[in-house]
């Protein structure tokens, strides 16, 4: 998982824009990105689990500490994400129920590609 986190950070197009308990960052993943391995060999698609990890990595930058995924809610994956596409990630976090809840959005060309809420501890 550390290699994945390192590669996610390396795919950032610029430093994260962080405000109080929220952040935005743009990413572009090459076809060689480890997250595409095996999903699928002839038609690479960024797996939902990797999309969640991208949002978690941004949330960790927002709160300034490593976090662990406790649960996922309200997940909607509406668009396939392929290599070479710019993905704009937004998280809005708040303290709630002994954890940090982060409303997360992934957008491509201004269109919502995925949205979900992460509970992180």
Image: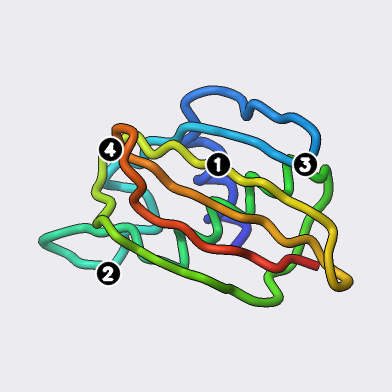
Residue occupied by mark 1: 90
> Which of 73/84 is in front?
73
Q: Which sits earlier in the primary sequence, circle 3 or circle 2?
A: 3
Q: Is residue 95 left or right of residue 32?
A: right
- CA–CA distance between discs 3 and 4? 27 Å
Q: Please identify the quarter of the rendering in which residue 117 is found.
A: bottom right
- List x then y, in percent, for residue 61: 73, 41
Please say if 111 is above or below 95.
Answer: above
Image disc number at residue 38 = 2
The residue shown at (21%, 58%) is 44
Q: Is residue 85 left or right of residue 112?
A: left
The residue shown at (67%, 46%) is 92
- CA–CA distance between discs 1 and 3? 11 Å
Q: Please identify the quarter of the rendering in which residue 64 is found.
A: top right
- List x then y, in percent, for residue 6: 58, 46
Please say if 94 is above or below 70.
Answer: above
Closer to the observer: label 3 or label 2? Answer: 3
- CA–CA distance between discs 4 and 1? 16 Å
Considering every residue shown, the one lying at the far top of the view is 14
Residue occupied by mark 4: 85
Q: Which sits earlier in the primary sequence, circle 4 or circle 1?
A: 4
Closer to the observer: label 2 or label 4? Answer: 4
Closer to the observer: label 4 or label 1? Answer: 1
Q: Which sits earlier in the primary sequence, circle 3 or circle 4?
A: 3
- CA–CA distance between discs 2 and 4? 19 Å
The residue shown at (75%, 30%) is 19
Disc 1 element:
strand
* Coloration of the structure image: rainbow
Q: Which sits earlier in the primary sequence, circle 2 or circle 1?
A: 2
Residue occupied by mark 3: 21
- Tag 1: Cα neighbours inside 10 Å, few (<14), some, or many (≥20)? many
Q: Which sits earlier in the primary sequence, circle 2 or circle 4?
A: 2
């Amino acid at each position: 998982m550390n290699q994945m986190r390192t590669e996610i950070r390396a795919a950032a197009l610029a430093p994260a824009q962080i405000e109080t308990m929220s952040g935005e960052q743009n990413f572009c993943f090459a076809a060689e990105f480890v997250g595409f391995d095996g999903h699928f060999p002839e038609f690479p698609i960024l797996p939902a689990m990797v999309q969640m990890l991208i949002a978690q990595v941004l949330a960790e930058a927002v709160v300034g500490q490593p976090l662990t995924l406790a649960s996922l809610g309200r997940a909607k994956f509406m668009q396939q994400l392929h290599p070479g596409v710019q993905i704009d990630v937004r998280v809005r976090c708040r303290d709630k129920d002994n954890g940090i809840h982060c409303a997360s959005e992934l957008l491509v060309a201004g269109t919502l590609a995925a949205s979900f809420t992460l509970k992180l501890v």
